Image: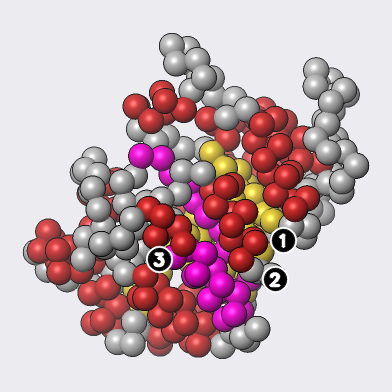
Amino acid sequence: MKLSILDPVQIPVGQTSGEAMRGSIALAQTAERLGYHRYWLVEHHDVPYEANPAPEVLATALACATKTIRIGVGGLLLNHYSPYKSAEAIRTLGVLFPGRIDVGIGRATAGVTADTALKRHRHIETPDDHDDQTEEFVGWIGNDLPETSPFRSIGIMPDEPAGPLPWVLIATEASALRAARLGLPMACSAFHVPENAPGAWRAYHENFRPSRFAVGVDRPTALLAIRLIIGETQAEAERLAMPMRVAFKLRRKDNIMLTEMPTPEEAIAIMGEVLPAEDADWPAYVVGSPERVKAVVERMARDTGATEIMVQDVLHDAALRHRNYELLARTFGLTAR
């Protein structure tokens, strides 16, 4: 099984945004040494304890600091941007680091104020045209826009090979069907709405059609993304997972945005106890000892047929992040480079 990392670039307690970004560069180097397959960056806006608003910029630094691991802008929130300009940035990355760059196409809201700030025209309602945006972006990446496109006469470095390969970020069956229809790889989030993951995975594989695009694929290609904290013991993992669980509970369910990452002790005080690991078949957080984590991840892979698992941690300390991935690599027997 391949293991990869999805980095939200959280700011460790007591550090700055710059230190967090430099910490991500160091973590990518550790991931490469340990044998991880990909290292992707998320795109979020106006999250005080994250330093990831421009993943295509940070991805350049990661690619410069590593040699073999695949680097991904995972995701590019296309609903906010021009497909042409976005494709120019990703094409540039692909040309600079041939064969090593991925891009995940997604859409998300960042809150009313940030969504408005991201717009060029702030008094016009943004249409729901994600399908059209996705197809245009993919056409730019491969320099094969359809003959009906008004932009057919221009290209983006057409003297270079098509690419990088775009992935569709999915959390629902509808987005899985989009990836299948376009013949693109799928990165399935099993943490946004965990119960959606098995159905979305199945819909993609049952409805997949080989791509008509220069940068598509001819067979289903997918990875499964999860949030995961591993510890030497179950009790240690559950304690270390508390900042992650509190941050997302307050952010998603209570509409409260923390100004900084809490420590485990602060998170426990907020919740009143250490929350036990979930027993659901598809938990929002995979938390546990090496034995428990291995059993849960292998069951998820078995239930879907996934051969690549992408892991996101939200830990409050930089050293603990390195330890998390070292322990995970050891648990699954990754081959160090």
Residue farthest along the top direction in this orientation: 123
Is 38 placed above or below 146 here? Answer: below
Would you call the spot at circle 3 few (<14 residues within 10 Å), some (14-19), or many (20 or more)? many
- Residue 162 painted magenta: no
Element carrying mark 1 = loop
Q: From which residue to which does the magenta span run?
A: 23-46
> Which residue: 67% across, 40% down?
89
Q: Position of residue 163 (x, y in %)?
A: 78, 48
Indicate which label's residue lies in the foreground, 1 or 3. Answer: 1
Q: Quadrant of residue 288?
A: bottom left
Point out the tag, 3 or 2, that comes first from the N-terminus: 2
Q: Is residue 129 left or right of residue 237?
A: right
Answer whether labels 1 and 2 touch (C-beta < 8 Å): yes
Q: Quadrant of residue 143?
A: top right
Would you call the spot at circle 2 few (<14 residues within 10 Å), some (14-19), or many (20 or more)? some
Would you call the spot at circle 1 few (<14 residues within 10 Å), some (14-19), or many (20 or more)? some
Is 150 placed above or below 26 here? Answer: above
Q: Is residue 89 left or right of residue 311?
A: right
Circle 3: residue type: Asp
Residue wearing tag 1: 100
Residue 205 visible to an observer of this rendering: no
Circle 1: residue type: Arg
Element carrying mark 3 = loop
Element carrying mark 2 = loop
> Which residue: 87% across, 46% down?
160
Residue wearing tag 2: 68
**Which label was assigned to residue 281?**
none
Q: Nearer the viewer, residue 160 or 16?
A: 16
